[in-house]
Amino acid sequence: MSMFSKLITLFRGTAHEAGAAVVDANALRILDQEIRDADNALARARDDLATLVAKRRMTEKELQNLRDQSVRYEGSARAALSKGDEALATEVATRIAELEGEIALKTPQLGDMRSAEERMHQTIAQTQQKVENLRREIDVVKVNDSVQRAQAAVASRGGSATAALGSAADSLKRIKERQAVQDEKFRAAGELEDRRTGADLDAKLAAAGILPGHTSASDVLARLKAPKEEALQLEAPRLQIEAQPVPVERKDEA
């Protein structure tokens, strides 16, 4: 195979793929148009059927008219025969023969027209049913296509939302880390300032209760209790003396 033939084959394959892609992308529009074409074809078929019905009815009227004429002429021929007018009877008989020939010719035509009419009725009804079934299937396909597009949109937006939430979480994490670092800087600066001014040492002495001029709650409570304890210590000897028994004088010793 020459290079030119290969290029032609490649072009045909590419054109087929491109055509198939276009058909797939516009499948619903194509189906809608095919349904419209089928409806138009059905409308033309109904028009043809209406024309056939009209012609069949006209043929029936013509046949009925021919039969009526044939019956009337038969009466006229008998009347001519009864009068002995053989020539007139023969002329009337000739006309009757012509009428019967036309009746014999149109009767099969009428039968064919009735058969064609019946077939067209069945064909139109079947085609109409197929079109309706296809239209319902297309409606289902359209609904499914809409649902799938909605699902794809939700999935796409959900993925975008997930990515956005992930990015927001990363940003929040970085902000918290910066704030934590800044807090540590402030804390370290405060500690350095306390060491420079001796505030940290004073805090340690105050916590130990040995800072000059520092009075704790326990110290205050001890001070409040001290006067009572001293007074009790002073009153103790006197109370002991008062508690001793007083000697009783005896009269006989006096």
Image (tube, helix red, strand yellow):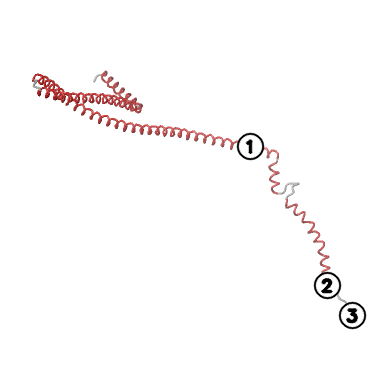
Q: Nearer the viewer, residue 126 or 103?
A: 103
Q: Which residue is mark 2?
A: 245
Q: Is residue 213 left or right of residue 114?
A: right
Earlier residue among tags 1 and 2: 1
Provide the secondary structure element on which disc 1 rests.
helix
Q: Which residue is mark 1?
A: 186
Q: Position of residue 200 (x, y in %)?
A: 68, 42
Q: Residue at x 37, y 31 (%)?
A: 142
* Quarter of the image with the N terminus in it: top left
Q: Position of residue 150 (x, y in %)?
A: 42, 33
Residue found at the very far right of the displayed protein? 254
Q: Quadrant of residue 189?
A: top right
Q: Which mark is residue 78?
A: none
Q: Quadrant of residue 69?
A: top left
Q: CA distance from mark 1 to mark 3?
A: 96 Å
Circle 1 packing at 10 Å, graded few (<14), some (14-19), many (20+), is few
Earlier residue among tags 3 and 2: 2
Q: Label 2 sits on what residue type?
A: Pro
Q: Is residue 236 left or right of residue 19?
A: right
Q: Label 3 sits on what residue type?
A: Lys
Q: Which residue is mark 3?
A: 251
Q: Residue at x 28, y 22 (%)?
A: 12
